[in-house]
Amino acid sequence: MMRGGNREMRRMLDRMGLDMKELPNVQEVIIKTDKKEIIISKPAVTEMKSKDNSIFQVIANSYEEKELETPVFSEEDILLVSQQANVSAEVAANALKETKGDLARAILLLSTK
């Protein structure tokens, strides 16, 4: 812990060009990845703004993780499979679902049909 507490921290952030403020009344924060969602209820969220970007700090006592039932594939993956197997994007996405995201297997599956 810093001596001087909050006041010293504010001075240090000012010297670094950061403006720090707490976001009031945040109900929920959701972090989505391609395989799961992390749901944080009633977190304390602080935003640190600089000239070019913002940093968000999320503090919570607990969170919930949910596995996604349908994996999400990037547009680049779908486009690659679509072009390599010479099929539509919808057919390529279905092949990726069937092969659980394995690009090579999806292309091979579509090429041998």
Image (cartoon, rainbow, N blue to C red):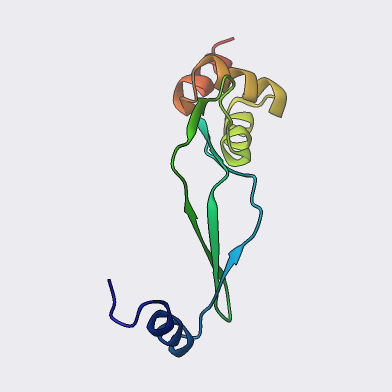
- Looking at this view, is 22 or 94 the one in front? 22
Asked if residue 2 lies left or right of residue 28, the reply is left
Rendering coords of residue 61 (x, y %): 44, 42
Q: Where is the C terminus found, in terms of image quarters?
A: top right
- Residue sitting at the far front: 4
Rendering coords of residue 91 (x, y %): 68, 20
- Taking the spot 53% from the left edge, 23% from the top edge, the residue there is 107
- Taking the spot 42% from the left edge, 77% from the top edge, the residue there is 6
- Taking the spot 54% from the left edge, 48% from the top edge, the residue there is 43
- Taking the spot 28% from the left edge, 80% from the top edge, the residue there is 3
Q: Is residue 43 visible?
A: yes
Total count of labels: 0
- Residue sitting at the far bottom: 15
Q: Where is the N terminus found, in terms of image quarters?
A: bottom left
Rendering coords of residue 44 (x, y %): 53, 54
Residue 8's place in the image compared with 65, above or below, is: below
Q: Residue 47 appears in which quarter of the rendering?
A: bottom right
- Looking at this view, is 60 or 87 the one in front? 60
Q: Residue 22 appears in which quarter of the rendering?
A: bottom right
Residue 91's place in the image compared with 2, above or below, is: above
Residue 21's place in the image compared with 99, above or below, is: below
Residue 89's place in the image compared with 54, above or below, is: above
Q: Is residue 88 visible?
A: no
Rendering coords of residue 55 (x, y %): 52, 65
